[in-house]
Amino acid sequence: MRILLIEDDPAIRNLVKRALTDEGYAIDVYSNAEDAAHPALEGIHDLFIVDLALPGMDGLQFIEQCRGQGIRAPVLILSARRSVDERVAGLEKGGDDYLTKPFALAELLARVRALLRRASGIAATESTKLRVGDLEIDLLRREVKRGEATVELTSKEFSLLEYLVRNAGRVVTRSMILDHVWNMRFAPLTNVVDVHMHRLRTKVDGEFARKLIHTVRGAGYVLEAR
């Protein structure tokens, strides 16, 4: 999943970026809203994390601009502002959740997972779990099961599977996968997606009669319980 982060405090910015990267997310980081405005309007991000007190264009103006241009990715607002009126203003401008500073990274990650889960519309068996058919992903423990069998995945394979599950039933192209899982915008000659997809399918589908990951010829891949 690809996240856009706007935070002008370098310490907080680096801390959040590192935490999200360790969780397998692809991150685009900006210190001001002006630089982030154009990339945000490309519609390639699954989530925005936006500080309110930014130099120049503030966070509320940024959110309002994105919503006005039809961008519907969920927005997690970060702010040291604690008043009820300020929280309400942030949510009314188009924010989806609000986290006051200082915050615990564990809470930020939990809110990110909740917003992404809500946006994807995927079934959640618990607050930190996603399920498609007999496949279950525990986002907190970073564990995968098919039925009663545990599936051992590398960090990148887990990120790839999570992206497929969040887009269950929808075809995702190699370019989309590179963009959201590897944070690579243009890499037409690389076979990294095919290599990792082969390994993932071997682990997730190899021993099961019912396959979940399917190739769509000339388009990409789709995960669905057929």
Image (cartoon, rainbow, N blue to C red):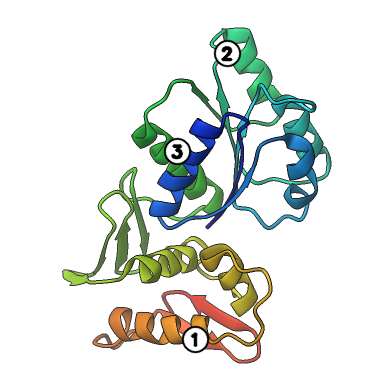
- The residue to which callout 3 is attached is 15
Disc 1 and disc 3: Cα gap in Å?
Answer: 32 Å
Mark 3 and mark 2 in contact (Cβ < 8 Å)? no
Question: Foreground residue, 205 or 9?
Answer: 9
Residue drawn at x 70%, y 28% as measured from the top left: 59
- The residue to which callout 1 is attached is 194
Secondary structure at badge 3 equals: helix
Q: Earlier in the sequence, mark 1 or mark 2?
A: 2
Quadrant of image for the C terminus: bottom left
Residue drawn at x 60%, y 16% as measured from the top left: 87
- Residue 217: image x %, image y %? 60, 92
Let me know if residue 211 appears in the view.
no
Q: Earlier in the sequence, mark 2 or mark 3?
A: 3
Q: Is residue 193 above or below residue 49?
A: below
Asked which quadrant contains residue 42, the reply is bottom right
Outermost residue on the front side: it is 10
Outermost residue on the left side: it is 148
Residue drawn at x 61%, y 66% as measured from the top left: 179
Q: Amino acid at mark 1?
A: Asp
Disc 1 and disc 2: Cα gap in Å?
Answer: 46 Å
Question: Foreground residue, 124 or 189?
Answer: 189
Secondary structure at badge 1 equals: helix
Q: Is residue 92 left or right of residue 13?
A: right
Q: Amino acid at mark 2?
A: Arg
Let me know if residue 169 appears in the view.
yes
- Residue 18: image x %, image y %? 44, 46
Q: How many marks?
A: 3
Asked which quadrant contains residue 93, the reply is top right
Asked which quadrant contains residue 53, the reply is top right
Other residues around mark 3 within 10 Å, as few (<14) / some (14–19) / many (≥20): few
- The residue to which callout 2 is attached is 81
